Amino acid sequence: MELGVYVHIPFCAAKCKYCDFLSYPGQGKAKKDEYLHALREETRLYLRNLPRFTVTNFYVGGGTPTCLSGGQLFLLLDFLGGLLQPAAGAEITIEANPATLDREKLRALKKGGCTRLSLGVQSFHDGELHSLGRIHSRQDVYNTYKLARRMGFSNISLDLMYGLPGQEPAGWRESLREAVGLEPDHLSLYQLAIEPGTPFYDEFKQGLLQEFEQDRAGEMYEEAIGFLAAQGFHHYEISNFARRGCESKHNQMYWQNREYLGLGAGAAGYLQGVRYTNQKNLAAYSEMVAQGVYPIGEKEKISTELAMREFMFLGLRLLAGVDKNSFQERYGITLQERFGKVIQPLKAHGLLQEGENSLSLTRRGLYIANEVFMAFL
Ligand code: SF4
C-alpha cells in the first residue's frame, strides 16, 4: 500500500488577520518539544497498527513549521524519516514563512531530507503584507529565497494571494512579475476569503472591511493564468502552476482522492475509507497519544456514493480532469452510468468537456468551478 503523509505543526510567531488555520501563536520551546514528542508517539501508534505501507511523499504544514528551531526541525524530519522510511525519490515538503528561516534552519532541513520548500509570500508589497498581519517583508522574501537557492534547495514553491483589501490590478501584476522574476519551480495563487473567527471577519461585520468584488477577483485570476502561461508555467490545478515536472505530488494525491495519513493536532487524514480530523486542543491531543489511542476528534466513514462524488469534485480541480477508466476501476460503474445526468447539462452549458478518457472543466467552467462542483454534491 502506498501512502502520503500530512504532518501539522500548529505554531506560528503571530496570527495573520485572515487566518482560520489551526495555529497557536507565541508558544515557547518546552511546548514545542512536548508536541514533537507526542507527534513521534502518534506516528509509532499508526506504524504498530496499520498494514505495511510505503510513503511516497510527506508534507509538513501548519501553522508555520519553520517557527521551530533548527534543532527541532532536524529532530522532526529525522524521526519522521526514520519511522516512515519514505521511498527513494519521495517528495518531502516543508511550509515556511520567509521571516522564520535562516541559514541554520535551512541546513537542518537539508540534512533532514527536505526536498521541497513552500514559501508563504502572499504579496511583494510591504503595505499589503502589513494589512494582512504577515510578519515578513518583501525584502525577507528575497533574502530567504536567495539563501535557500544558494544552499541547494532546487524545488521552491511560492504562495501568492489576490483580492486583498485595497489591491489594484497593477499591484497584483507587480507581485506576479516579482514572483516570476525569482524563477520559482511552482506557484500557488489563492483568493483571499474572509473566514468567520478571524480579525478580518470582525472588521467585515463592523463595516470596516469590504468583500472584494468577485468580478474583479476573476479578472485578476484570468490575468494571472495568461501571464504565467506566457512565462512557461503549466497550469495543472485551479490554483496551481508549475514548471513541467515540478507539480506537487502531495497535493495531486488529494485531488486524485487517494488515502493519506494525517498526523498532529488538527490534522485531517483519510485512511481505510474513513476521513478523520485530529483533536485541535494541544493538551487533549497529547493526552490521547500518551494513552495509546488515536487522537481523533471527528471521523466519518465514507460511503461508496460519497467517495464517487468526492472523486468528481476533487478530480475536476485538475486541469487534466478526471480519468474515466480510473473511476470505473475503483467503483465498478462507468462515469456515464453514474453521473451522465449531471454531466450532460454541464457540457451543454459549455462548463465541462470530454476527451477520449477524461472529463474536465472548460475555460469557462474554470471561472465558476465551485458551481460545477456543487452539481456533484
Ligand atoms: S503564518 Fe499561516 S498559519 Fe500562521 S497565522 Fe499566518 S496564515 Fe495562519
Image: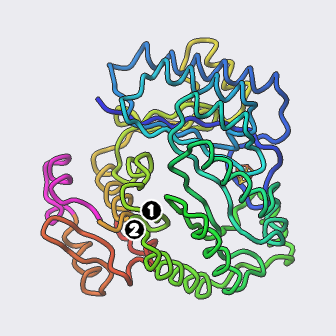
Vertical comparison of 356 with 119: above or below: below
336 or 221, which lies in front? 221
Q: Which residues are magenta?
A: 321-338
Residue at which label 1 appears: 242
| x and y percentages locating residue 302 in the rendered image | 37, 42
Disc 2 from disc 1: Cα separation: 5 Å
Residue at which label 2 appears: 234
Please name the residue shown 52% across and 31% down the image: 113
287 or 249, which lies in front? 249
In magenta stretch: residue 366: no
Task: Say if disc 1 is inside 8 Å of ligand 1.
Answer: no
348 or 69, which lies in front? 69
Q: Look at the numbered disc 1 and give the secondary structure of its residue.
A: strand
Disc with the residue nearer the chain's start (2 vs 1): 2
| x and y percentages locating residue 375 in the rendered image | 36, 70
Judging from the image, the colouring scheme is rainbow
- Tag 2 near tag 1, CB within 8 Å: yes
Q: Look at the numbered disc 2 and give the secondary structure of its residue.
A: strand
Vertical comparison of 168 with 311: above or below: below
Amino acid bearing label 2:
His
Quarter of image, res 242: bottom left
| x and y percentages locating residue 299 in the rendered image | 49, 36
Q: Is residue 117 left or right of residue 122?
A: left
